[in-house]
């Protein structure tokens, strides 16, 4: 389900992407394997999570992640890799978390679509 994104939204995403490092699915899988403390975070809406998600992921939707991240991941140096549907909302959320003092934040390029297409492990 491809959305027609507004120019203002795309400009906001581009601004965030200038500050948030991106990784692809292969890099994400490698980072998770190399660092057992790394956390993959799905920032999509509840209904998107319920329909299917990356098997190792925690769910902290973009609407609540800033409010709930301290309780879920109290250590600010924890490696966080965020993903959404295609890599836009995760960049926005990652930018916010960096502003909150998280120092090791990445956004997974291509998001859930890329994860699924790569045949990476999923769950419902």
Image (tube, rainbow, N blue to C red):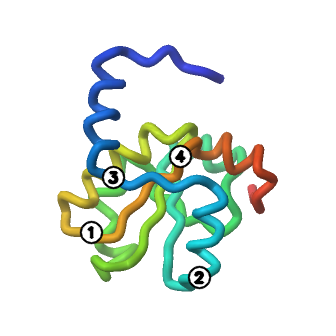
Q: Residue at x 34, y 34 (%)?
A: 13
- For residue 47, which quarter of the picture? top right
Residue at the disc numbered 4: 109
Mark toward the start of the polypeptide (2 vs 3): 3
Q: Which mark is residue 34?
A: 2
**Residue contact at pointers 2 and 3, CB within 8 angstroms:** no
Q: Which mark is residue 26?
A: none
Mark toward the start of the polypeptide (3 vs 4): 3
Q: Which mark is residue 102?
A: 1
Distance in Å between CA atoms under marks 2 and 1: 20 Å
Distance in Å between CA atoms under marks 2 and 3: 21 Å
Q: In the displayed structure, would residue 30 be above or below residue 90?
A: below
Q: Is residue 54 left or right of residue 81?
A: right
Is the C terminus in the top left, top right, bottom left or bottom right quadrant? bottom right
On the image, the x and y values in percent for residue 48 come to 61, 42
**Residue contact at pointers 4 and 1, CB within 8 angstroms:** no
Distance in Å between CA atoms under marks 3 and 4: 11 Å
Where disc 4 sits, the SS reads loop
């Amino acid at each position: 389900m491809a959305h027609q994104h507004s120019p203002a939204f795309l400009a906001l995403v581009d601004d965030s992407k200038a500050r948030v490092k991106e990784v692809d699915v292969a890099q994400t899988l490698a980072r998770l394997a190399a660092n057992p403390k790394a956390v993959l975070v799905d920032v999509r809406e509840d209904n998107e999570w319920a329909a299917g998600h990356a098997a190792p992921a925690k769910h902290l939707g973009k609407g609540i992640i800033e409010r709930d991240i301290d309780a879920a991941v109290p250590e600010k140096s924890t490696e966080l890799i965020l993903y959404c549907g295609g890599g836009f909302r995760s960049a926005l959320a990652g930018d916010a978390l960096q502003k909150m003092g998280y120092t090791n934040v990445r956004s997974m390029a291509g998001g859930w679509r890329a994860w699924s297409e790569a045949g990476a492990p999923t769950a419902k």
